[in-house]
Amino acid sequence: MSAEKRTQGRVIVLSGPSGAGKTTLHDLLLKAPEFRRSIVRSISATTRAARGKEKHGREYLFFSKKMFEHKIRSGQFLEWANVFGNYYGTPLKNVRDILRSGKNVLLCIDVQGGQEVKKKIPQALLIFVKTPSLKELQERLIRRGTDAKESVALRLKTAAKELTKAKHYQHVLVNDTLTRAYGELEAILKKELPSLSRR
Ligand code: ADP
Ligand code: 5GP
C-alpha cells in the first residue's frame, strides 16, 4: 500500500466500584513508557467541588450544575451519570479528537457510564475492576481516607449492585495485588490493541 492508512484509535473503559483501584491502575498505565504515547486520558466533567490540589482542566473540568445540564441538553457528552449526588460526564468532542489522531482514549468512569458507552460504541474495550471481596473494598475505602463513614457505607451498598454488571464487560480484572493486577491489565491491552506493538 503506498499511502499508510491511519488507524482510528479505540475507546478503553475502566470501570467498577469506587475504591476498586481504577485511579491507581489508570495512573500506572499513563506513566508506562509502552502506553504513554498511544493511550490518552479523557478528562471528565463534574459538578462536584474540587478536592485539595485538583485543578480545572487537569483532574476534571469543574462545572456548575447549570452549565452541566446545558451540556447534557446540547448533546455534548458521550455519556453522563449521577454518581453519589453529583453529575459526571465524558465530553464527546475530546474523545472524538483523540480517536481521530489515531490514539486510544482511556475513560475511568462509573458502571452506569460504562454501560452507556457499551451501548453507543459496541467496539469499545470494557474492563471491569473489582477487589477480591467487599470486605477488602471496605478496608481500602477506609484506608484511602477520602470518605466519611456514611459515604463509605453508601459506596459499599452501591458496589454490591455494581458487581452484578461485571458480566457485561469483556474483561473482569481482580485487583488483588497491584503488581499482578497491573500485569494482567498490560496483557489485556497488548492483546486487544495490536496497534501498540507497531509503535
Ligand atoms: P477508585 O479509583 O476505583 O475509586 P483508587 O485507585 O482510589 O480506587 O483505590 C482505592 C484505594 O485502594 C487507594 O487508597 C489505593 O491506594 C488503594 N489500592 C489500590 N490498589 C490496591 C491494591 N492492589 N492493594 C491495596 N490497596 C490498593
Ligand atoms: P471521584 O469524585 O471520587 O473522583 O469519582 C467518583 C466516581 O465517579 C468514580 O467512580 C469515577 O470513576 C466516576 N466518574 C469519574 N468521571 C466520570 C465520568 O465522566 N462519567 C461517569 N459516568 N463516571 C465518572
Image (spheres, rainbow, N blue to C red):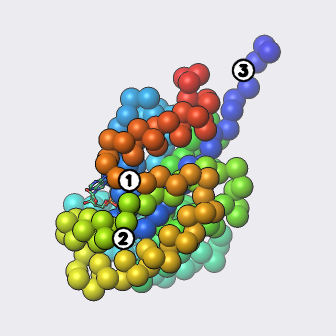
- In this figure, which residue is indicated by the disc labeled 1? 175
* Amino acid residing under circle 3: Glu
For image coordinates 24% across by 68% down, the residue present is: 139
| Mark 2 Cα shell of 10 Å, populated few (<14), some (14-19), many (≥20) | some
Residue at x 45%, y 76% (from the top left corner): 160
How many numbered circles does the render carry?
3
Q: Position of residue 164 (x, y in %)?
A: 55, 72
Q: Is residue 107 visible?
A: no
Quadrant housing the C terminus: top right
**Residue at 46%, 43% in the rendered image:** 185
Q: Report whether residue 100 is seen.
A: yes
Dot 2: element: helix
Residue 17 numbered tag:
none
Q: CA distance from mark 3 to mark 1?
A: 39 Å
Residue at left offset 22%, top offset 65%: 144
> From the viewer's perspective, is the residue at label 3 or at label 2 nearer?
2
Question: Which residue sits furthest right?
Answer: 1
- Residue that numbered label 2 is attached to: 134
Horizontal and vertical percent position of residue 155: 37, 77
Q: Residues within 10 Å of mark 1 (few under 14, many from 20)?
A: many
Q: Classify residue 18 by image quadrant.
A: bottom left
Q: Nearer the viewer, residue 62 or 121?
A: 121
Q: Is residue 26 above or below residue 165?
A: above
Indicate which label's residue lies in the foreground, 3 or 1: 1
Q: Is mark 1 within 8 Å of ligand 1?
A: yes
Helix, strand or loop status at disc 3 = loop
Q: Earlier in the sequence, mark 3 or mark 1?
A: 3
Q: In this figure, which residue is indicated by the disc labeled 3?
A: 4
Q: Along the polypeptide, which appears first: circle 1 or circle 2? A: 2
What distance separates the C-alpha of mark 3 from that of mark 2? 49 Å
Check disc 1 and report its element: helix, strand or loop: loop
